[in-house]
Image (cartoon, rainbow, N blue to C red):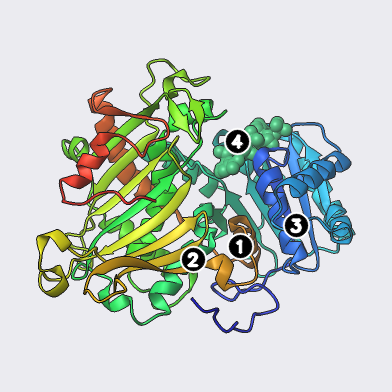
Amino acid sequence: MTRPTPHEQPLTRQTNSGAHVEPCTLVIFGGSGDLTRRKLLPALYNLRLDGLLPANYAVVGIGRRPWSDDEFRKIAHGGIEQFSRQSLQQDTWEDFARRLHYFSGASEDLTTYQGLRRRIEEIETQFNLSGHRIFYLAIPPSSFGPSCEGLRHAGLIYPADLPDRVSRVIVEKPIGHDLESAKAINTTIGEVFDESQIYRIDHYLGKETVQNIMVLRFANSIFEPIWNHKYIDHVQITVSEEEGLGTRASYYEQAGALRDMMQNHILQLLCLIAMEPPYSLDTDVVRNGRMEVLRSLRPIRGTDVEHVTVRAQYTPGTIKGQEVPGYRHEAGVRPDSTTETYVALRCYMENWRWSGVPFYLRTGKAMPRRASEIAVQFKDIPEILFNAASLTRQAPNVLTFRIQPHEGMALRIMAKNPGSRATTHPVDMNFNYGDAFSAPSPEAYERLLLDVMAGDASLFMRRDAVEASWAWITDILDGWKVLGSRGLSEYPAGTWGPIEADKLIATDGQQWRLV
Ligand SMILES: NC(=O)c1ccc[n+]([C@@H]2O[C@H](COP(=O)([O-])OP(=O)(O)OC[C@H]3O[C@@H](n4cnc5c(N)ncnc54)[C@H](OP(=O)(O)O)[C@@H]3O)[C@@H](O)[C@H]2O)c1
């Protein structure tokens, strides 16, 4: 595929709404945590390196660990060296580092917030900041409430309608473990922040290929006319992880694959593939479009749960030559655990565009490869010409979005085999981001942090969307609760899932793609 003529790039990062990135103080609750070290600080550093941060900004990390600013900077340095997309450059680092600060305190302790307020005000004076504040909750959900309440108590939050000062809050997943708990978290945060100030992050939405789904659909003329039940046979969405449980037992035992991957990432991918064309890129227009998809999902309830969902746990196996213990033998897992490490299901949307088109969704741990992809399979051609004989049935056209690894797209078409005979062979037209564009794709957190600084919430989850996806998932969880351990299948680690998942799709005459 030839490289496109580069379109002129704006000097500052353009968000969907075209909003400006304002000077601000970013206050990270969970500043001593893993997410901050591995993702947030490297993302900020890359934004700085690319000249995308505002001229004035400051970062304050908060944690219970009694670190000094210097210790925080040292951790940041190590995190950037290890995880940054671009290598560390001394002069940029020095300017970046002097804007990093650390404040020690527990979320539940109200005295934390008076001290925090004084510290923030000192920093804002030092860096000539106007008082725009972004609070990032990279802490366990049980601390969301006390943190928001503490911030309000200390007078650190401005009302949403103030013209010249903004307060925003970024909320990390998990937002709840079912519909009721999600509502409770949303209500807790909503008592302190207005919905327009809340940015619920799903980092999948910040990935380049995920954003490209909308570009592909709505910036090209050839796809939209055939993007419906008349031409599309079915859609498969796969998110596979190579790792097993690792050290996440305490979280994962309570979560499982349906909550961990399906409720958020996979349903969001589904929304982008299935949404109606929005009439503008304004935040709520795009979010309404995604929301409509969730509303039109047919609920999976009662006996349907047993028939259209498959859940399974991995048993001992081998991944890339390494032996992997079965899930129930992993450290921290109950020997009789029924937590699913794999889920596959078939769902439908009850709307005109997608009537009768099955969407097959699957995700699992301890699989042969780490991969995320969406495959849109088009209908078979008529059984004439090249497709006349049952022995030489033509492979269907498939448009594939590869989200990770090797971000890109492929269109499978049939081509003639070279030679004098009229035989055919499926070939892929491939587009790789890495080959087509010289600049490496930014990390999802880079894009998302910048969008919050600009006040653009289109890539974030609105309260109604979070609750609609939990409502749909909670029906399935309720069905599984009734079934108990009945219906929990097994698959050896290092394989693509249980036989029951193959049967689920085979009943429709299809098979899972090899990703
Ligand atoms: N890591 C990821 O890739 C990832 C991805 C998506 C979502 N998340 C979510 O993001 C949150 C943070 O994840 P993480 O991986 O960074 O976890 P982590 O390494 O365990 O860090 C947790 C952070 O929260 C702080 N914290 C915990 N309880 C606190 C309290 N009562 N008061 C003040 N600070 C408190 C900890 O501070 P001290 O240790 O100093 O006490 C630490 O900075 C979690 O809710 C997680 O589910 C993480």
Q: What label sits on residue 139 in the rendered view? A: none
Upstream in sequence: badge 1 or badge 4:
4
Cα–Cα span, label 1 and label 4: 26 Å
Disc 4, disc 2: CB below 8 Å?
A: no
- Label 3 crowd (10 A; few <14 / some 14-19 / many >=20): many
Upstream in sequence: badge 2 or badge 3:
3
Q: What label sits on residue 143 in the rendered view? A: 4
Between 504 and 110, which is closer to the camera in this rendering?
504
Whether residue 335 appears in this view of the structure is: yes
Please name which of the two marks, 1 or 4, marks the residue nearer to the observer.
1
Disc 2, disc 1: CB below 8 Å?
A: yes
Residue matched to label 3: 45
User: Image point 80% across, 50% down: which residue?
Assistant: 120
Whether residue 464 appears in this view of the structure is: no
Query: Which quadrant of the structure image shows residue 247?
Result: top right
Please name which of the two marks, 4 or 2, marks the residue nearer to the observer.
2
Upstream in sequence: badge 3 or badge 1:
3
Task: Give SS at disc 4.
Answer: helix
Upstream in sequence: badge 2 or badge 1:
2
Cα–Cα span, label 2 and label 1: 11 Å
User: Image point 22% across, 74% down: which residue?
Assistant: 421
